[in-house]
Image (spheres, rainbow, N blue to C red):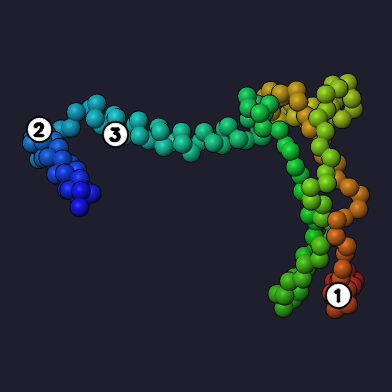
Amino acid sequence: MWIQLDNLYATLLIVKYNMAYRERDRITLSGERPQPFIYKFLYGIVIFSCLLLALVAPIMVFSTLSESFSNFNPVVQADLSVSLQMTSMTHTTSTYLLYESTSKAQLTTVTDKSSSEYKCFATDLTSKYSKTTGKMQTVQFPSSSDTTWRVTPTGLIQLGEWCCS
């Protein structure tokens, strides 16, 4: 019972403030006087800027290309999956998994700036980006796949026909 009375009181308070606002800005709301610039500025530019910031800020903070936050966002896991997808003339699609490696990649941070890996990639990165952070990670995947390549006899015939045609 008391929750209903509290709800009623809150609703009446909102109506009271809405009526006071409408009475205070009666001339502006009726269209006789233009809305002040400060309200246009606050409702337009500031709200738009906040929405734009809410969209762009996560991209800037969590991007691996972000130079200022790259120390806080290193790559911790890499997965690789390579498959062969064939589409026949009848538009049937066959997919064959060739290589898959999940969670077994070796991630190392290259700290020796005189190494050949660092020199090779640093020259490529500085030509594409104005400033590099000086920290680089390399990823090495295992030479053997986690899964075996199992092709059905029908798929092997289709693969042979596709390769020979």
Instruction: Report the side of 115 relative to 29 (left or right).
Output: right
The mark that comes first in sequence, 2 or 1, is 2
The mark that comes first in sequence, 2 or 3, is 2
Alpha-carbon neighbours of circle 2 within 10 Å: few (<14), some, or many (≥20)?
A: few
Residue at 35%, 34% in the rendered image: 47
Badge 2 marks a residue whose secondary structure is helix
User: In the rendered structure, are the residues bearing label 2 and label 3 in contact, judged by CB atoms less than 8 Å apart?
Assistant: no
User: In the rendered structure, are the residues bearing label 2 and label 1 in contact, judged by CB atoms less than 8 Å apart?
Assistant: no
Badge 1 marks a residue whose secondary structure is loop
Q: Which percent across, then down, holds residue 161? A: 87, 75
Q: Where 83 sits versus 128, above or below? A: below
Alpha-carbon neighbours of circle 1 within 10 Å: few (<14), some, or many (≥20)?
A: few
Q: Where 4 sits versus 95, above or below? A: above
Q: Visible in this render: residue 29?
A: no
Q: Visible in this render: residue 163?
A: yes
Q: CA distance from mark 2 to mark 1?
A: 79 Å
Alpha-carbon neighbours of circle 3 within 10 Å: few (<14), some, or many (≥20)?
A: few
Amino acid at dot 3: Tyr
Amino acid at dot 1: Thr
Q: Which mark is residue 24?
A: 2
Amino acid at dot 2: Arg
Instruction: Report the side of 127 relative to 17 (left or right).
Output: right
Residue at 10%, 36% in the rendered image: 20
Q: Quadrant of the C terminus?
A: bottom right
Residue at 15%, 40% in the rendered image: 13
Residue at 71%, 33% in the rendered image: 74
Q: Which mark is residue 43?
A: 3
The residue labelled by disc 1 is 152
Q: CA distance from mark 2 to mark 3?
A: 19 Å
Q: CA distance from mark 1 to mark 3?
A: 64 Å
